[in-house]
Amino acid sequence: MSLLSSRNKFWRRFEATIFEVVELAIDIFKAQGSFPIKEDNLNREFYFCLVTANYQLQKQNRGLESPPFYEGNNQPSSNDQERTTRESKRPDFQWTITDISESDPEKSSKQFVLECKRLGQPVGNWILNKNYVNHGIKRFIDEDYGYAYGVESSAMLGYIQNMDPTSILADVNSNIKSLKQNLIKKQRNRTNFIELSHIISKNFPLNNLDLKHIWIDTRKSKKT
């Protein structure tokens, strides 16, 4: 097996384990039946769902060694000679793993990022679907944010607060056109979420990113 394919296999296994945790966390989150409205409150509540999901899976000898970092800074890269703007930016969630297939130990620490945003009709001056793109997707493209720096895949979580998912997807894709990126494609409806796929290009390592999208419907009941 080549070193490249070994790295790919290692990362995909890590990614698959993260999604196992995320899917169970969504089940726990949805079972609550009511949800916060504000993004910070949603993310904080979802964090504890991730922790609980990982705990349950670890008791079955599955899951990850540790829960994600919540609002932790991007980690430094040995590609940079000094501190960068990217290092002061804070993805919503990130998991870290040591890739022992890396020949350079300084490059062996890798992070999988999950960035979360609300979806639906505008809230005052805050245009949710547009900001999903400009304050979400764009952070994986803009080098000053550099989310998912140096890895091949990452993810976004969308909290659907109103509007139907088909209209949201059309609106989000309309805004993606301004970035001159590929559009998001719907993959399938799962029991508690919608799965979508997206390949974006960027100017920092690696050049193409498999950005998965997971949308949760929170329209039925809300709490402050």
Image: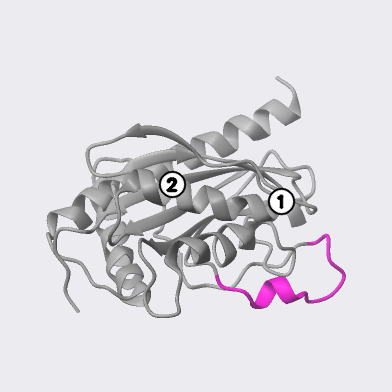
Q: Main secondary structure of the magenta part?
A: loop
| Foreground disc of the pair 2, 1 | 2
Q: Which residue is mark 1?
A: 150
Q: Which quadrant, please, contains the C terminus?
A: bottom left
Residue 58 picture location, percent across and down: 29, 47
Left-right relation of 134 to 160 = right
In-front residue for pair 70/201: 201
Q: Is residue 26 above or below residue 124?
A: above
Q: Is residue 25 above or below residue 1?
A: below
Distance from disc 2 to disc 1, alpha carbons, whole Å, reads: 28 Å
The residue located at (74%, 29%) in the rendering is 3
Label 2 belongs to which residue? 169
**Can residue 214 be seen in the rendering of this structure?**
yes
**Residue 115 at x, y = what percent?**
49, 60
- Give the residue type that dot 1 points to: Gly
Residue in the picture at 40% in, 43% down: 19
Instruction: Report the residue that reaches farthest toward the right.
Output: 81
